[in-house]
Amino acid sequence: MRRAHFKTSWIVAALLAPQLLVIFVFFYWPSAQALYWAFTLEQPWGGGNTWVGFENFRNVLSDPYYWSSVRVSVIFALATTALAMGMALTLALFVDRQLAGYRAFRVALIWPYAVAAPAVGLAFQFVFNPGAGIFSYINTISPGLWDPSRYPAQAVLAIIIAGAWKQVAYSFVFFLAALQSIPRSLTEAAAMDGARPLRRMLDLQLPLLTPTIFFLIVINITDSFTDSFGIVDTLTGGGPFRATDLMVYKIYSDGFRGFDYSGAAAQSIILMLLVIALTFVQFRYVERRVHYS
Amino acid sequence: MIERTPILNILTHLILISGLVIILIPIWLAFVAATQTLQAVNSAPVEFWPGDQLWVNLREAWALSDFGPKFINTLIVATGVVVGKITLACITAFAIVFFNFRGRMVIFWMIFITLMLPLEVRIVPTYAVAANALSPFQTILDATGLSGLIATLSGVEVRLEWNLLNSYTGLILPLVATATGTFLYRQFFLTIPDDLVEAARMDGAGPLRFLWDVLIPLSRTNIAALATIMFVYAWNQYLWPLLIITDRANYGMVVVQLSDLVPDQLTTGGGTPTWHLAMAATLVVMLPPIAVVILMQRWFVRGLINTDK
């Protein structure tokens, strides 16, 4: 709380109005609209929407395609998070040893953050292509062994690898910053006590990284739910046989290709609740971190 | 600190180099593909060394995707989003921190909560709003009976209409609200000592003068950090422009062009997939944000960590 303030005047309203207008029109109104659509159904011959209660949710939740979409989204979220964070953590721990050339490594590991999701998807579609990509070697063993456009499991594997590749840089930046904020005196004291570098990684650095790890798990999972659209759209298009139809992709295809606004809205509400729940977890953590520091 | 750990040092280098190889391989393969001819890129043993067709392919991909105007569009939109986000973040945080009025925290939380509503999640209704950005107000007027009242009083029927589809405004406006930017600016403004505010007031500076002459010059680092992150964010937008721009000849953005290059039955008609062009275009599209991140590395890392995204 500050002591010194300017006198409140019309200026305050003028300063706040732009942002408030934008979030009203593009955030709160659409979210309310999604709620409205989720609980109503448009009449086939016009005449406005009628209230249907939880009917749309019942339809969505009894749709086996929806559940397979939830299942693959959860698998995707957990696998990309584990892969990306595992790799980012390992690399950050070793870059932090600051041997010769570590600056070059740092730059080389940060830039993938800037690559657009659809570009990642397209590049990986080439890499995984059964005819032209590097995975075509598998097909020289036995033709037709590798083809993500035909085998669901391989398609899921493909989006997981592409998704993880895209996430590594973000986690790496955070891990490295957290490692560099560990006081040198702590590391030196441990060294004096005879702890070798690997021992220090396990017993000193890793425990001190716990808050960062927790924060990154939440962020990575949230991102994989919302940010995966571009990768899926250019890498698999949701196929084959809807095997990579992630929740956000299904909302898009049901809403804009199937014109099922009520169904898409009900799915949006479910995904929104999921994101809100994850964000709350994160808020609790942010509060804790402020408290401890 | 001096420690002799020769074996561990070798191991460290090995781990880092293999990490680097994993990160670089997909992009390297894409680059190699972009340097080959159509036949070479589709022949069975994968090439690991670049050919000599890079320039030819880049030019062909550039012409095919009509990248010239798309680059200008994307630059306009990215600049608009960056300037819009920084301006909104700055003035909103200024109002919240340097004025004492009721409902300050309510407004702050109202902005902060939008973090939980990413565009992808509310995409269908947001698209509906973009078709007529004034529809919320129209609905409110209709629902409260105000539009009926105006119609009977003045004889003018209220029809608010502002279509954002196929326009720069439509690409920029929905993206300029920023919870993270406002938060970052608020954190920074809270570190400004009260004495500075009092000194400025003593010298007769009004709030706007204080903002312009004192705070904005002080927040240059903030601006650089935010601008880097927001530029990458705006440049890489895909779903939103894909939906609201149907007139791609005039308003298309570069990243969306990639959706046309996915070599499948639709684009090749059963012919040989044109991977060399798809990869050349991919390289062109990803280059500008990568360059920005590498050039602005220091600010980028700082911004990323301070905003917690």
Image (cartoon, rainbow, N blue to C red):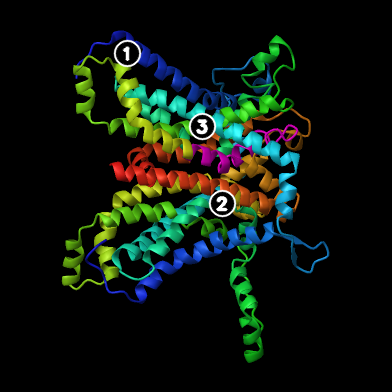
Q: Please state if B302 lies on the left or on the right of A159 as rendered.
A: left
| Residue beneath disc 1 | B9
Q: Give the magenta range.
A: A219-245
Which callout, 3 or 1, points to the residue nearer the camera? 3
**Tags 1 and 2 in contact by the CB under 8 Å rule?**
no
CA gap, disc 3 to disc 1? 28 Å
Q: Nearer the viewer, residue B300 or B58?
A: B300
Q: Please state if A109 lies on the left or on the right of A161 as rendered.
A: left
Type of amino acid at the residue the image marks with label 3: Thr
Count residues near mark 1 (Cα–Cα under 10 Å), then give few for <14, some for 14-19, many for 20+. some
**Tags 3 and 1 in contact by the CB under 8 Å rule?**
no
Q: Please state if B267 lies on the left or on the right of B122 as rendered.
A: right
Dot 2: what SS?
loop
Work out whether disc 3 and disc 2 sit on a shared chain.
no
Type of amino acid at the residue the image marks with label 2: Leu
Residue B119 numbered tag: 2
- Chain of the residue where label 2 is placed in the rendered structure: B
Work out whether disc 1 and disc 2 sit on a shared chain.
yes
| Residue beneath disc 3 | A81
